Image (cartoon, grey):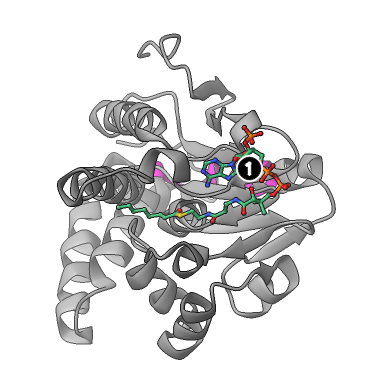
């Protein structure tokens, strides 16, 4: 297991195969500055490189405290950026969102409070979003003379539809947890942060029983197919579908069914 002790703005703790990733800048409502993004990049790269043999089979991401998941990119840091510096900062944020999508294990964004701007963008890069009733989503960048820069102009449309995404981005308005659930941005809503985390743990209790290899390849086929035509997407699915036939998990899962016993998956 890699060393997480050096991180200052995030924490990562593993318990019962679940990695608990927390953005740890509570006083600044967990706003994303360059340090947070760099530490996220480092952690996610380790998780991707470890893959096989990793003790982490799923990740729950949340923000420290009760008030915010992430209240956006750090406005104070962006205030004086040059065009070149903004490009580097934007590219780093985008890279982190792509690393979430490349994680070999599922990651659930548990949105407790504000998920604005870069916060909404990080949540959308996770596999799916659970939220508390008090959660507030939005892409308020236009109110600051900015535009979404960590993937919001691309992922929000893909999740809620282009016209709805345009209305949300052009107005910069808040989206309540209730509305987020109605439009498919958050898929489950819980009364408290405690229940939110317990809800994600319950979902992982099902995911941890199935083949980690099959989940990984489903994720890969679904993420890579997102931007393709149906024919190209089906071709990607076929690649991953045939690839599972070389796995021990596939032999174990099908043999266990035929032998009428529970499977014992290893992730290989
Ligand atoms: N950046 C920096 N600091 C922040 C941020 C932020 N996004 N959000 C909150 N903070 C800080 C506040 O400045 C304050 O600090 P301090 O106590 O030192 O004054 C502390 O957190 C607490 O915040 P508030 O006092 O404002 O708390 P309230 O409960 O009154 O308000 C809000 C909560 C409504 C969430 C309010 O803080 C707010 O409006 N925050 C900004 C939300 C926002 O606009 N987010 C989008 C930012 S832009 C963005 O994310 C762009 C992403 C792509 C960038 C690409 C770059 C190239």
Q: Which quarter of the figure has residue 172?
A: bottom right
Image x and y of residue 156, in percent: 43, 72
Where residue 104 appears, as percent x and y from the top left, is: 33, 42
Using the image as rendered, state which of residue 197 and residue 124 is in the foreground. Answer: 124
Which residue does the image show at 44% across and 57% down from the upper left?
Answer: 121
Residue linked to disc 1: 205
Placement of 214 over or under 44, stated as above or below: below
Q: Nearer the viewer, residue 143 or 107?
A: 143
Q: Is residue 129 left or right of residue 242?
A: right
- Magenta span dominant secondary structure: helix
Of 39 and 145, which appears nearest the observer? Answer: 145
Asked if 170 appears above or below 199 in the picture, the reply is below
SS category of the residue bearing label 1: helix
Q: Is residue 67 above or below residue 9?
A: below
In the rendered image, which quarter contains the C terminus?
A: top left
Instruction: Kindly give the residue lying farthest to the front in the view shown.
Output: 80
Queried on whether the Cβ of the residue with tag 1 lies below 8 angstroms from ligand 1, the answer reads: no
Taking the magenta stretch, the answer to whether it contains residue 184 is no
């Amino acid at each position: 297991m890699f060393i997480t002790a050096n991180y200052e703005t995030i924490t990562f703790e593993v318990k019962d195969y679940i990695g608990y990733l927390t953005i740890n800048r509570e006083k600044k409502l967990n706003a994303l500055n360059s340090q947070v993004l760099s530490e996220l990049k480092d952690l996610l790269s380790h998780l991707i490189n470890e893959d096989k043999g990793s003790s982490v089979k799923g990740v729950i991401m949340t923000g420290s405290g009760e008030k915010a998941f992430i209240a956006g990119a750090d406005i104070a840091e962006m205030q004086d950026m040059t065009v070149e510096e903004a490009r580097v900062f934007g590219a780093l944020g985008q890279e982190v969102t792509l690393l979430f999508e490349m994680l070999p294990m599922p990651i659930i964004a548990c949105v407790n409070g504000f998920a604005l701007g870069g916060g909404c963008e990080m949540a959308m890069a996770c596999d799916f979003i659970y939220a508390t009733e008090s959660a507030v989503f939005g892409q308020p960048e236009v109110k600051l003379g900015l535009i979404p820069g960590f993937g919001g102009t691309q992922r929000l449309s893909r999740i809620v539809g282009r016209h709805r995404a345009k209305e949300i981005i052009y107005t910069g308005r808040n989206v309540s947890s209730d509305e987020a659930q109605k439009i498919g941005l958050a898929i489950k809503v819980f009364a408290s942060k405690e229940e939110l985390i317990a809800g994600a743990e319950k979902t992982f209790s099902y995911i941890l029983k199935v083949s980690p290899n099959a989940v990984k390849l489903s994720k890969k086929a679904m993420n890579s197919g997102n931007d393709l035509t149906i024919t190209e997407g089906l071709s990607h699915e076929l690649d991953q579908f045939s690839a599972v036939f070389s796995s021990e998990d596939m032999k174990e899962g099908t043999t266990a069914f035929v032998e009428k016993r529970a499977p014992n998956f290893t992730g290989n």
